[in-house]
Image: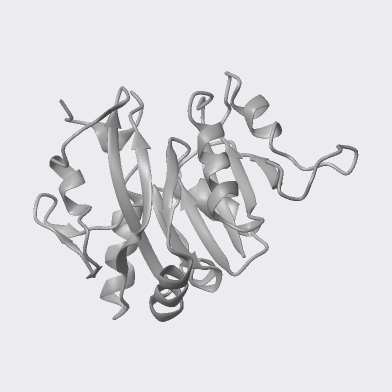
Amino acid sequence: MYSVIIRVKNEEEHVGKAIQSCIDFLEKPEIIIVNDNSTDKSLYVCRLFISNNNLEYKEDSNYCNLKIVNITDYTPGKALNLGVKYCSFENIIILSSHCSIVNFNKIVIKKSLEKYGVIFGNQIPYYYGKRIKKNYIWSNFINEEVVNMWSKSEDRYFFHNAASMFKKEILIKHPFDEDLAGKEDRYWAKDWINKDNKILYQPEFQVNHFYTSEGHTWKGIG
């Protein structure tokens, strides 16, 4: 069973696809929406998926246990740490609100997570709907497993929260830095690995990552 944390700020275009992909690939997921003052229809879209005893639907319908948590004074790390507090399951997925799961090898991923405690997945970039070449940081997302991936372009350990997984106990003992304005994932990975731990890049967990103008991953693309 998986708890999924999705950070949301004005993501009405993509967040529904993100949630639907979790329902499609995960068995009865618990989804935690951490809302950063959205002003569009993001929360309306999220609420479409909330299961309710007053609704008539089959168990295989497109509903799930979805919680919405609001955050003020947002930072990426603070939003994730808040989401962890609401997670009921020991296996936590962090998924970008503009990513959709397209491959999830349950057997391989379960073994990987049990062995390493922290893994992250493959990402396929889409720029205005067009699948693009994996240049820039996208070149790190290859088709082979890598332990403690090193990014030559960034000259540091590489890890990406758009599609990552953790054992809950790890995030409780080692939370994200709440003061960072960005790259909270890279700094977390550096600290974790420097404490003699390992992170696995597992391409059997794969998402499509869609362009948004506010997404930091897309800086310098083009």
- x 43%, y 77%: residue: 111
Question: Residue 207 in the image: x percent, y percent?
Answer: 38, 47
Question: Residue 100 in the image: x percent, y percent?
Answer: 44, 41
**Quadrant of the snapshot with the N terminus:** bottom right
Give the vertical position of 219 relative to 121 (above or below): above
Give the vertical position of 115 relative to 104 (above or below): below
* 151 on left or right of 161: left
The image shows a total of numbered marks equal to 0
Q: Nearer the viewer, residue 87 or 127?
A: 127
Residue furthest to the top in view is 40
Question: Residue 101 in the image: x percent, y percent?
Answer: 44, 47
Question: Residue 190 in the image: x percent, y percent?
Answer: 27, 65
Q: Is residue 180 visible?
A: no
Residue furthest to the right in view is 54
Q: Nearer the viewer, residue 103 or 121?
A: 103
Give the vertical position of 113 relative to 10 (above or below): below
Q: Quadrant location of residue 48?
A: top right
- x 57%, y 40%: residue: 20
Q: Is residue 145 visible?
A: yes
